[in-house]
Image (cartoon, coloured by chain):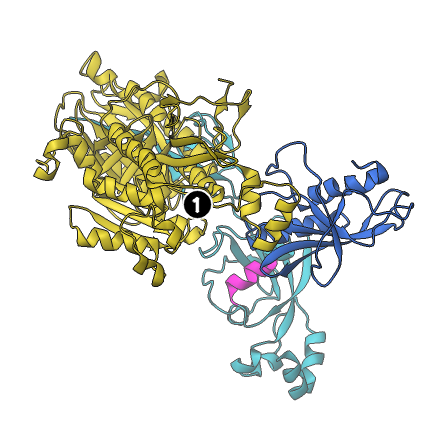
Amino acid sequence: MIIRTSEIIWTQIDQILNRSFNQNRTLEWGIIGVVEKLGDEVFLIREIFLPTQKDLDQSEGGLIFSSPYIRRAQLWAQRQGKSGLVFFHTHPLANDQVSFSWFDDTQEPLLIKNLREIWPGSEHISIVVGKNAYKGRVYLQGERAQDLMKLYVIGRTIKVISLFGNRVQPPMPSHIFDRAKEVTSAGALQILKDMKIAIIGAGGTGCLMVELLRRAGCGNLLLIDDDIVEDTNLNRLLFASSTDVEEKNKKVSVALRANDQCVLENKLEIIDGNVTNPSVLHKLSGIDLLIGCIDKDYPRYVLNDFAVKYFMPYVDLGSEIGIAGEKLQSLDARVTYVYPGGPCLNCRGLIDHERIRLEGLQLQERRRHIGLGYCQDIDIKQPAVMELNMRAASFAALFIRHLVQPFLDQGGEMDFRESITSMTIKKVGLKSPKMECAVCGYKYNFV
Amino acid sequence: MEKVIEQEFRGIGKIIESLDMEEGLPEEILKISEQEILGLKIPFKVSILSNDEFKVIEIKLSDSVKEVMHIIAKEFHQKLLPPEPEQPLDQLFYYDRHNNIMGPITDLAAPIWEVITQHHARLKLSLKLSLSIQVNANWKIAPKEEMTPRAILQLFDLDDGQYSLYHLDGSEPLPIDTLVKLHRGERFVALKDGKYGGR
Amino acid sequence: MEQTLMLKQLSEAVAGGFNACDRMENGQLYMLVNGVPTLNKDWTIATVDMLISVPNTYPVGGLDAFYIDSALMLHNGQKHPRVQPAPNILGKSWGVVSWHYNKPWSFSDTFLTHIYHCQDFLRKGSRSN
């Protein structure tokens, strides 16, 4: 089981807890948050309640969360339909190892039992914090406490905190990655290896992402697409052949075949499906990183909405060849990163609702609307070449390395556009007057 | 079934019509086998205790005491407490031949006809609605209409040094020694402090 | 689109006084609204049938444009210039009107608000440009 939260929330939690380690190292500090369960494996820390002076009692050598403090969080959580509470408390003298004390083990179950009397069906989390170590457990319905594995903090980078109670030294990585260790160290590599990464779209950029991520050391990949291989794909679909066209093979099967034929240290799972189908989307609940390699606006909207709602980091790729008449005007590659607290694809104008409307019409009906002057290019097969897709995929793969071990310039809003024709790469700002995004609530200004 | 019985026992309808609720069940009915008593509806006088208003309603003789309590409560636009499936804390009383109120009836599963015949009771019942209150998942009868939170916690065997008491939707703890006016069905939350320590 | 949402919005349209129902042809969902008041004496008929295609991406993909019974004519004997010919749908002859919103479709817009929006075209009569 893992927990995920946003960098914004984590920063506030950290500020309170660090009081135990920065100043007087005898005082225990704590904070209460609200959690929401997503699927069977993930809890999201949705909200935290900063303690006031009356909320914590540190006078007896331990820490007491006052019942009004707990009540405040519990009432809010219950009214919002959330799953339970999370209690953080520190052990100030613990450094690289921390565990729940005998006192925690006797008192906490009583509190949890009390909470469940008031709030039937609730599930609660407890995390004890040392200077460099964290230990977490979850009280699920009708069961004893279970250990938690990790806490993901999602923001402009991805931080993974082990909840095993000690500083875990990452194992020595395989020699396969010797030449990459200066870019991605052992610790970061272990994060990539453990993360579950979903690539949506197995076309020109998607197939490249699978290969790049496998070779970067990403251990758990999920590839989703429902499309078959066509002959016009062969100029850019990695590992696809004319046999795949004749046999009408699925693009995801091509990727799986290549994965199985060239064994590295990863698992690749495929889903022949579309994320606009709720049952397929539901399978993304246990994913740690989304990568969008899609060329339609509605699935992009669905993924964006999902990522924003569930604090999921989402890297979206795009490539475009611009033609005027018969003349090549532009060759552009794009990588955009969506993270909690930051602008989403909708704010950035990367989702066209008019296109979404037309994508939802049957072919004949769509053509009538196009005939009326709506969105002339929606049914036109856009030009595409592997080299351009590779620019976007390559940058995205490097960006994913950066997320777990930062090395890029952190300024700006995580939207990168490369123009091959003008040989420039730039960070793109938001382009609209002051508005609040209907999807993520981000308030963005004209840049 | 009622019609079948009336057809088979032509006299029964007339007997029911002429029942004197102050007297109780006549011999003719008592002679009917237990099987056939099922489905016979008999008029009873019923009231809520401490309220003088009596109403006449029909009750099946085979209904259990608990079912009869529900019927009477419904007639007076009330509900028994605690809610199902728990056993009610409210009580049902009967009247003897001299019109003395007797009870409460303790066996809630017994059919009402058995209770009436056993005690030679009138066809007259009164329901006492107790001052039931809830704390967390438990219900008890409050001994007084006003109690302090301390006393309420003690009533529910909760340590007033460990727990604070709240109204069901309240976010502030009730002052521990300030009297609270209680109403039937009122719900409270008792919540502990959360204690942790590296000791 | 979700069945419950469709039913809810159709019910709202009916509660708004319109004879609205759903229809399907060749996999395309339509909202058919019979007898929409034309609201302007420029038209030769007082009520007209309207047909609106509903994308399966609704409500994220909104509504736009509408079909109008091809019997709709102005008193000068002409069809309105904004009404373009359209093929038969649901066994009936229609004209199609592109009638843009001047703001993006939002989640507060519904089948009913779109009917009102389309009725705006009718209300303006010959002045609808």
Q: At x 35% / y 26%, what residue is drawn?
A: A9
Is there any visible trace of residue B56 in the rendered image? yes
Q: Estimate how packed mark 1 is, as few (under 14), some (14 to 19) or many (20 or more) residues with alpha carbons within 10 Å.
A: some
Image coordinates for residue A370, horizontal then vertical, percent: 61, 45
From the viewer's perspective, tell me whether residue A395 is left or right of residue A295: left
**Does the magenta portion include C9?**
no
- Chain C hue? blue
The residue shown at (12%, 34%) is: A170
Task: Please give left or right for residue A32 compared with residue A296 in the image.
Answer: left
Left or right, A402 with reference to B13: left
Residue A159 in sight in this render: no
State whether the magenta stretch is mostly helix, strand or loop: helix
Q: Is residue A118 left or right of residue A95?
A: right
Q: How far across and how far down the image is residue A202, in percent? A: 34, 48
Given residues A427 and B150, the one toward you in this image is A427
Question: Which chain comes out yellow in the rendered image?
Answer: A
Percent across and percent down for residue A273 are 39, 54
Vertical placement of residue A162 versus A428, above or below? below
Residue C107 placement: quadrant: top right
Classify residue A173 by image quadrant. Answer: top left
Q: Is residue A317 above or below residue B76?
A: above
Label 1 resides on the chain identified as B
| Element under disc 1 | strand
Which contiguous range is marked in magenta? B64-72
Task: Chain B: give its colour.
Answer: cyan
Mark 1 — residue?
B140
Q: Quadrant of the N terminus of chain A?
A: top left
Relative to the observer, which residue lies in front, A184 or A154? A184
Residue at 35 percent of width and 62 percent of height: A246
Q: Does the magenta segment cover residue B70?
A: yes
Type of residue at label 1?
Lys
